[in-house]
Structure formats: structure tokens, C-alpha cells
Image (cartoon, helix red, strand yellow):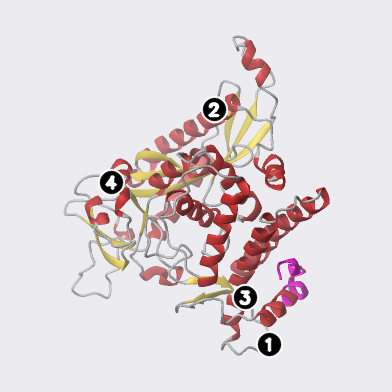
Amino acid sequence: EEFLQHAYKSKCEFQMEVNGTITMDIETGVRKMIEMILQHLKIKSPVFEVANVIPTGSFYEGTKIGAPDEFDFMLTLAKLSGADKISLQPGCSDWYPYIKLQPGVEFPQKYKINNFYEEERKNKDFLGNPRFVATDFWKEIANINASVNENIPLTYGTMSFVPCNGKKLELQYIQNSTLPQNTDIQIKEEISLVGSLKIGVDLMLAIDHPSLESILKLPGFPKNFKELLYKHGCHVIPKSCHTDHMAHTKCWFVTFSCMERELINNMNEHHKKCYKILKSLISSDITMSRKCMNLSSYTLKTAFLFHVYGENECVYSRTLSACICDVLHYLSSNLHHIQMPCFFARDMNTWGNILETPWFQWKGETSSGELGYAFALCWIKLMHKFVNYLQNTISKHTPLSDKDTKTVLSRCDYFKKAVEVVMIYFVKNQLVYKIEKDPGSLESCTDDFFSNFIQKLKYHYNVDLSFVE
């Protein structure tokens, strides 16, 4: 318990002295900047006119770690959201449907299926590769960002645009050197200087799901969340089930972000604290175009949803260590079987239809078949071993010494950074291994072969993770 309390104080509380007053000022600025962007977008590119801005992500779930420097929103497309705009057709799976435009709905031809070689033109009204839509959207955002040179004055500072290089809106908040003359004395005492803060804003295009009744008929959806579904709905976003579809795909993705936001936000403070602690210790989130398997914050969020709202729901607040060890045990079991159900789509693997890992093209010997496959299992076993290491550490009844506490926190930080370094290298160089068949479990990955994998990581990438063995 003392170790976890220390982890919370040192890693989870705002790393900058940003209290509620300044946080509210920053959030107001972010909203105003998005509103400005969308006004320009409506005029410059009407196809991307937005009907609704929906807050999502950790800030609105009440689980943000550190300063308020990351925000997430879904933007529903006005031309495709609403009654009688689209219908969803069977796609790559129940959760990756095809989108067919209803009669009379106009959308640019370049975003539809390429019918050049199809004489019957059966797919003429289907939307094509969702990446084309997302890419063009971000091109427009970048152009607007570059052309709009405005600072928005706020109560305690100003918000401005930063040049947008990727698929993320970047802003900068600069706090005023002096407070407004009419500022309440109590607020003056609470506010401390933060200087400037760079802020990243993720914007995800979305379409309102046209038929919630059809969701209830799917075997993977938990029917006890029917009321929550009708309260918030769900959305279809431009993500295909796999990048190997390239230009030929027409599957989009059904997301339950709004429902997840409410459940996470409604967790009690004890479970939010557990979530933040574990997130700070294990989650390694990096922005990349591929879905390389790792202990992402979404994986952790899914584990907590099952812990709090699943069949064996945790209905009362126990010790931090009890709940965190339960979640780590759940993660360990799912990693061992290389299958983790999504909370609202129980028949879909959280890690994807096709598992991706870095492709380690090393020589070696193994009895489990192809070396690429064997090393891919080692990568998954690395996550499994780390989770077990942390669970064993936290479950000890004897308190950790100050030295041991520093060692464990240092190892957690090192593990996250090491995973990031390896993932970025392999994804950047397109060295990604795909496990398309059901891998079964980690049983075939022997400890001897895994030890050899750890040694190779150290030799080739100067990454020493031997402490997980």
C-alpha cells in the first residue's frame, strides 16, 4: 500500500501546479480553438462540416495523469449523420461494417469504392478506404492551422495554434503575467504560475450509428447495457480492421467511446486512483499508424471496465493493492491466452483481428516453427512477464524499502521507454510481424527461448529487460 501511495503522489498528481481554475481556463480555450477551426472548415470544405463535438478520452473520464495537456474529441459528420443518411452492411466482422449511402445522399466520389473494374457497379454507393477520408480531413486542418494566426484571449491566459505536422491539433496556452483586477481573493490565493503549456488535441471523425437496434442483436454486445446504449448511442469511425487492406478496404469501425466515458467517469475515486496508478506504471502510448501489440492505456481501460462492471464486479472499495492485483491478474491471464475481449464487443479481441508485433529477423533455433512467429510470441510474453513481475511485487505482504521502491518505479519507467524505442524503430521501418492465425497461448514460448530473446534485445538495441525473467 505504501508503495502504491508513493507511486500515486510521485507519478499521478498534476506534474505542474495547475488547479481547477486554470484547468477550466485551458479547457475553455481548447473548445474555442476547435470551434474556430470548425467554422473555417465548414466554409473551406463543406464535406467535413461537423454536426456535433463529443468529448472523449481520459480528461473527460476523470483519469488524466499530469497536466491538462491532452484532449480528445469525436466530430460527427453532418452529411452522413442522422436519419436515413447511411445503412451498415455486413463487413469484415460485426464490428467492422461497410457503409452504404442511402439514396439522395451526396458524398465525394473519391471517397467511394473504386468501381473502375466492376462492370455491374454493385458497390457504387459504398464508402471506400476510411483512411482517405481521415487523411484529407487532416490536410484541411493543417491548412487552416497554417492560415489562422489568431490568439484567443481567456480569463487567465491566451490560447494559440502551433504548426500541425501530424494527425493531431497542437495548441499552446500562455498564462497571463497578471490576474484580472476583479479576480476573487480566494481564487488569487489558489492560482499558481504555470507559464506556458503545449497541448495536443486528438480529433476523430465519426458518424452516428444508424441502427442501435441492430447492435442489441449482435451476440458480442452485453445486453445489460441496453439503456446506456440508447442514452449515448455509438458511432462508426474511419478505422479499417487492418492496414493490409490498403486501398481495397471498405470496412469502418464501430466504437462505444461515449459509453466507455460514462462508465469510467462513474467509477468511484478508489478505482480511479487504482487506474491512474497502474496507468502510470505500465501503459506506453505512442502515436503510430499501425496497431502494434503493447500495454496501451486502452488495454488497461478495458481491464478496469471488466473489474468494476464485469460479471465479478468489484462492488466495494478495498485496498489499492487488492484491486490493482486483480486487474494485473486479469491482464496476465489474457496475455497468456493472447485474447482479451473488448468490453462492449465481447467477441472481438482488444489487440485486433490480426495481431501485430515487431518483426525480429534474427537467427536462432526453435521447435515452434518459424522464427518470426517465435519471436513475436516472445514480444507478447515480455508484456506477460512484466505484468507478473509487477503483480508479484505489489502482492508482497512486507513493505518495500525506500531503495526497493525507487528500483521498482525506475524499472517501470525503463520498461515503458524500452518498449517505445523498439516499437518506434520497427514500425518506422515497416518491420511488423502479423499473426493471422489463432496463436492459442504462450505455452509454446519456452523460458529458454525467451531468455535468448531478452539477450538479443540487449545486444541489438541496448535494452536490458532481464529483470522480468
N-term mark: 4 or 2? 2
Instruction: Say which label, 1 or 2, has the lower sequence index.
Output: 2
Q: Are marks 3 and 2 in contact (CB under 8 Å)?
A: no
Residue, disc 2: 24
Pointers 4 and 2 in contact (CB under 8 A)? no
Could you tell me how far apart the alpha carbons at marks 4 and 3 are, in whole angstroms?
Answer: 44 Å
The residue under label 4 is 81
Q: What residue is shown with label 3?
A: 378
Q: Of the residues shown, which amino acid type is indicated by label 4?
A: Ser
The image quarter containing residue 467 is bottom right
What kind of element bears circle 4?
A: loop
Q: Which residue is under mark 1?
A: 364
Q: Is residue 40 left or right of residue 434?
A: left
Residue 156 - label = none
Seen in the picture, residue 42 relative to 392 is either above or below; the reply is above
Q: Residues within 10 Å of mark 2 (few under 14, many from 20)?
A: some
Identified at 47% across, 48% down, the residue is 308
SS at mark 1? loop
Secondary structure beneath dot 3 equals helix
> Depth check: 50 or 392 in front?
392
Q: CA distance from mark 1 to mark 4?
A: 53 Å
